[in-house]
């Protein structure tokens, strides 16, 4: 198998973490480019290169041989088919891709809890709006999204599509991890409503390659620069 090159910011989990989890579960040979030497400069150069026919708009993006693939769901659609982390049948692959796109929608909403007015402003510039957005997120959006995934696991179980893990399960694991970090109090109160989702989270965490990754230095700690940010004022 080829050696993949993953391009993403070197100090945050962010959207790149969904790709990292899939590469780790697949036991793929990959280089996290921006975390080495002048890798971040290489990443920026690729985004502005005139030699690429398919230049990425933003990280993360994956170089696989001559292919340069951007957008998390697009990258995972490619990796899932190559590494047994998606169904073989077209209908099944599209279904897992659909689940991943729904997770992508949730990731945007999570980010907007602390930056509701836009990413170019600091959190400190939009605290009142963030408090309002975080409240609405937990009152309305979390029950809708996590309730949907809870129902899917109840119908198919123990993973989202049955007995075999897919990249969407790995991404859903990351959602639970991130919400526990960013909103420990709110998430603790909510978790009783999604027991099957918590079982899936524990099942993914116990997978040997994922467990080894989580215990390694390759796993970047959560921090207040990524998508999941812990601000106590939003976690009440």
Image (spheres, rainbow, N blue to C red):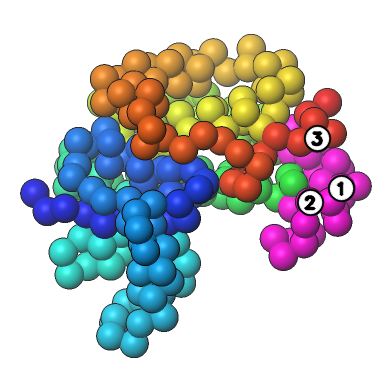
Residue 119 is one of the magenta-drawn residues: yes
Q: Is residue 49 above or below residue 139?
A: below
Task: Determine the CA span between mark 1 and mark 3.
Answer: 9 Å
Magenta-drawn stretch, dominant element (helix, strand or loop): helix
- Return the residue at label 1: 127
- Measured along the vertical axis of the image, is residue 175 above or below residue 108? above
The answer to whether the residues at label 2 and label 1 have Cβ atoms under 8 Å apart is yes
Q: Mark 2 highlights which residue?
A: 123
> Residue 231, how many percent across, how many down?
76, 36
**Point 18% across, 45% down: residue:** 29
Residue 196 horizontal/vertical position (percent) = 49, 16
Q: CA distance from mark 2 to mark 1?
A: 6 Å
Q: Secondary structure at mark 3?
A: helix
Q: Which residues are magenta?
A: 115-139
- Which quarter of the image is occupied by the C terminus? top right
Which residue matches tag 3?
A: 234
185 left or right, relative to 168 = right
Which residue ends up furthest to the bottom in the rendered image?
Answer: 50
Viewer-side label of 3, 2: 2
């Amino acid at each position: 198998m080829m050696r993949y090159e993953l391009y993403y910011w070197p100090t945050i989990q962010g959207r790149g973490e969904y790709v990292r989890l899939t590469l780790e579960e697949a036991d793929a040979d990959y280089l996290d480019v921006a975390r080495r030497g002048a890798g971040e400069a290489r990443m920026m150069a690729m985004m502005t290169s005139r030699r690429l026919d398919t230049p990425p708009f933003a990280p993360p993006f994956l170089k696989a041989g001559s292919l340069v693939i951007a957008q998390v769901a697009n990258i995972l659609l490619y990796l899932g088919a190559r590494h047994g982390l998606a169904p073989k049948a077209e209908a099944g692959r599209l279904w897992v891709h659909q689940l991943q796109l729904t997770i992508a929608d949730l990731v945007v909403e999570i980010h907007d809890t602390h930056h509701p007015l836009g990413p170019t402003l600091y959190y400190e510039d939009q605290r009142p709006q963030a408090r309002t957005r975080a409240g609405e997120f937990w009152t309305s959006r979390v029950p809708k999204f996590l309730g949907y995934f809870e129902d899917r696991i109840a119908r198919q179980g123990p993973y989202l599509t049955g007995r075999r893990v897919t990249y969407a399960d790995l991404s859903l694991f990351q959602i639970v991890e991130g919400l526990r970090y960013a909103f420990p109090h709110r998430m603790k109160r909510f978790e009783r409503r999604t027991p099957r989702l918590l079982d899936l989270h524990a099942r993914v965490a116990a997978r040997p390659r994922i467990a080894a990754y989580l215990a390694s230095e390759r796993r970047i700690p959560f921090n207040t620069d990524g998508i999941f940010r812990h601000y106590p004022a939003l976690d009440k």
